[in-house]
């Protein structure tokens, strides 16, 4: 054997990940190393063979290393190579050890928090079914100010989950009537020492939910550090 695989950098996270579209039973153990100029993903792929009594009688391991110039490039590779949630697993472990992985964790965690904030309000369903099979418009959507009420309820939900709700503003869409899930308003929130905004919408069946906006529609950064005295 040679002298081994030499990696430039220091370890910042690790996880056992399964490849997409692969019949292999064993996950790959993956490490991420970073240096001043690159991120390196080291993956150990294993295979084992068992006898009729399920005892391991043979095995093999292959170690590969792939270098990336940016964290975004690494994330795209992980998401395209391994099963869903793989990048989140690496970020969850590494957030404690690396500031850039912590920043990536903020984005993922707030998405998860936003998912937990969703609530269902039956009378906001676009149509209510009648016993004869016909449908009538949702009664609550006929009331003046129903959008503001739904946004206020979402603000309360986020506050209960630990967010500081800084302010809100009306929808930025010019044609919400044509949306399948119309936008109801925008909430600026703070958590984990960072600020961002959430877009509040309602779907066909009356579920009110909040999501991060499309970065392409943002004038500045999607996340920004909270003022130090308030963090």
Image (cartoon, rainbow, N blue to C red):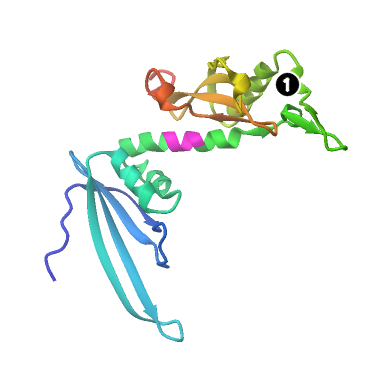
Pick the residue in front: 136 or 31: 136
- Residue shown at the point (48%, 26%) measured from the top left: 213
Q: Quadrant of residue 5?
A: bottom left
Up-down relation of residue 75 to residue 19 (above or below): above
Up-down relation of residue 131 to residue 202 (above or below): below
Question: Which residues, given as a range, are shown in magenta?
Answer: 107-111
Q: Name the outermost residue toward the bottom.
A: 52
Pick the residue in front: 210 or 105: 210
- Residue shown at the point (39%, 56%) measured from the top left: 17
Q: Is residue 164 left or right of residue 58?
A: right
- Residue shown at the point (54%, 19%) measured from the top left: 186
Q: Quadrant of residue 23?
A: bottom left
Q: Is residue 52 left or right of residue 158?
A: left
**Main secondary structure along the magenta-highlighted residues:** helix
Q: Quadrant of residue 22?
A: bottom left
Q: Which residue is mark 1?
A: 141
Residue 206 position within the rendered picture, expressed as x and y whole percent measured from the top left: 69, 31
Badge 1 element: helix
Residue 103 position within the rendered picture, expressed as x and y whole percent measured from the top left: 36, 34
Quadrant that contains the N terminus? bottom left
Residue 121 position within the rendered picture, expressed as x and y whole percent measured from the top left: 72, 30
Q: Name the outermost residue toward the right.
A: 132
Please check the rendered image and state whether residue 108 is part of the magenta-colored stretch, yes or no: yes
Residue 166 position within the rendered picture, expressed as x and y whole percent measured from the top left: 52, 17
Quick one: label 1, few (<14), some, or many (20+) residues within 10 Å? some
Quadrant that contains the C terminus? top left
How many labels sit on residues?
A: 1
Pick the residue in front: 50 or 79: 79
- Residue shown at the point (45%, 48%) measured from the top left: 85
């Amino acid at each position: 054997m040679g002298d081994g695989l030499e990696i430039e950098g220091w370890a910042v996270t690790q996880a056992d990940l399964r490849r997409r579209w692969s019949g292999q039973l064993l996950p790959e153990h993956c490490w991420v190393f970073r240096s001043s100029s690159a991120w390196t993903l080291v993956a150990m792929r294993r295979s084992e063979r068992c006898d009729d009594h399920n005892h391991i009688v043979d095995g093999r391991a292959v170690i590969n290393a792939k270098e990336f110039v940016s964290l975004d490039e690494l994330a795209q590779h992980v998401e395209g190579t391994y099963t869903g949630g793989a990048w989140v697993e690496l970020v969850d472990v590494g957030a404690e050890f690396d500031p850039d992985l912590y920043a990536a964790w903020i984005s993922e965690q707030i998405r998860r928090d936003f998912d937990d904030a969703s609530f269902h309000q039956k009378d906001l369903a676009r149509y209510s079914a009648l016993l004869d099979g016909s449908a009538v418009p949702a009664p609550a959507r006929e009331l003046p100010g129903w959008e503001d009420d739904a946004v206020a309820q979402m603000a309360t939900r986020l506050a209960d989950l630990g967010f500081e709700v800084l302010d809100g503003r009306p929808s930025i869409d010019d044609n919400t009537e044509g949306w399948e899930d119309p936008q109801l308003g925008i909430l600026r929130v703070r958590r984990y020492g960072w600020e961002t905004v959430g877009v509040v919408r309602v779907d066909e069946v009356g579920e009110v939910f909040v999501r991060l906006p499309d970065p392409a529609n943002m004038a500045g950064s999607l996340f920004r550090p909270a003022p130090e005295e308030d963090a």
